[in-house]
Image (cartoon, rainbow, N blue to C red):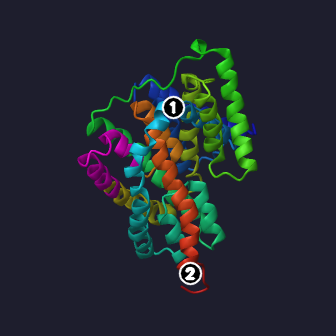
Amino acid sequence: MFAPRRIATLGLALGGALVFYLLHLPLPFLFGPMAACLIAALSGARLQGLGQVSVGARTILGVAVGASITPEVLARVPQMLGTVALIPLYVVLIGLIGVPFFRRMGFDRVTSWYAAMPGGLQDMVIFGTEAGGDGRALSLIHATRVLVIISLAPIILTGLYGVELTGAIGAPLRSLPLQELALMVVAAIVGWKGGERLGLFGASILGPMIVTAALSLAGLIHSRPPAEAILTAQLFIGLGIGVHYVGVTLGELRRVVISGVAFVLILAALAAAFTEVITLTGLAHPVEAFLAFAPGGQAEMTVLALIAGADLGFVVLHHLTRIVVVILGAPIAARLMRVRSKPAD
């Protein structure tokens, strides 16, 4: 776990966070590590992710979301169903646009199919590789999707919607009751490991979210994890995004990464269209609609929702629906459409 390369990678991430903090740049604990590790990876540095430590850091976000699920939030779920119902249409449109796009860029049918699906990075890579696709290309394409969305979203939030990304992400550690902190730790570990044992997708986030939500609804937890914990989660998320580019060749940059960037811009236009429709029809406020339909990773969008002070329940419900639709629907649709590897394409 603490091999020299991992220690060096963590040190690099901390250094990036410090530089961004001292320069008063936005979201220093997210963008600092991401920028430092990305630059180092593209420069040929032999970085290494932190494995289960990084996965464990995501439990903090699951606890944060779960703590935000209160009786008042549950009472508003029926009001959200109008926009949630748009998610399957959104996913289908992405597939109809994305699969032909990647085919035109020279990828095989299986890789094109799973590259287009806006699901979780690990899930799409695993599904695509098992179906005979190019796992390396899928990993880079989905990492690029997350990287570009997480980089563009703050600019759009501040420039277009006038959002100040200074929302209170959590109370200081010293101000939270010890019993609630202990319950959060238990919820994180039990939810994560219990979710893995049950085969729950995204167990590191969804497991703690479910357990913490139960504790919140029972009146045992009244606050989110401390600010220090959420900043730590941001650091590991930024580190993880950058490390995905370790070993990228010039050829992969030209073909795979640029294809991923181009597709994300198409996704951004589609997300903007849905956001506009939702806003004009009065189904949701612009910031919540934008964050709910931005096709980034669930963990990354949760962080942005926290910092933007958005309705966390609304944003997470939509991303959870999108991931469920993709994870359950993509493999089934692939079989029905006979999307599989073949010797000659």
Q: Is residue 282 magenta-colored? A: yes
Please tell me how crowded label 2 is: few (under 14), some (14-19), or many (20+) other residues with Cα within 10 Å: few
Main SS category, magenta section:
helix
Would you place residue 10 above or below residue 263 in this image? above
Q: Residue at x 66, y 69 (%)?
A: 130
Three-letter amino acid code at disc 1? Answer: Pro
Whole-number angstrom distance, CA of label 1 to CA of label 2:
44 Å
Quarter holding the N terminus is top right
Residue 203 coordinates in the image, percent (x, y): 66, 46
Going from the N terminus, do you reach mark 1 or mark 2 first?
1
Q: Residue at x 52, y 79 (%)?
A: 337
Would you place residue 296 above or below residue 114 in this image? above
Task: Give yes or no for contact between labels 1 and 2 (Cβ–Cβ under 8 Å).
Answer: no
Q: Secondary structure at mark 1?
A: helix
Residue extending furthest toward the bottom: 344
Please tell me how crowded label 1 is: few (under 14), some (14-19), or many (20+) other residues with Cα within 10 Å: few
| Mark sitting on residue 338 | 2
Q: Which residues are magenta?
A: 270-294
State the residue position of label 1. 71
Residue 322 coordinates in the image, percent (x, y): 48, 55
Would you place residue 321 above or below residue 305 in this image? below
Residue 219 coordinates in the image, percent (x, y): 60, 24
Locate residue 42 relative to residue 149 in the image: left or right. Answer: right
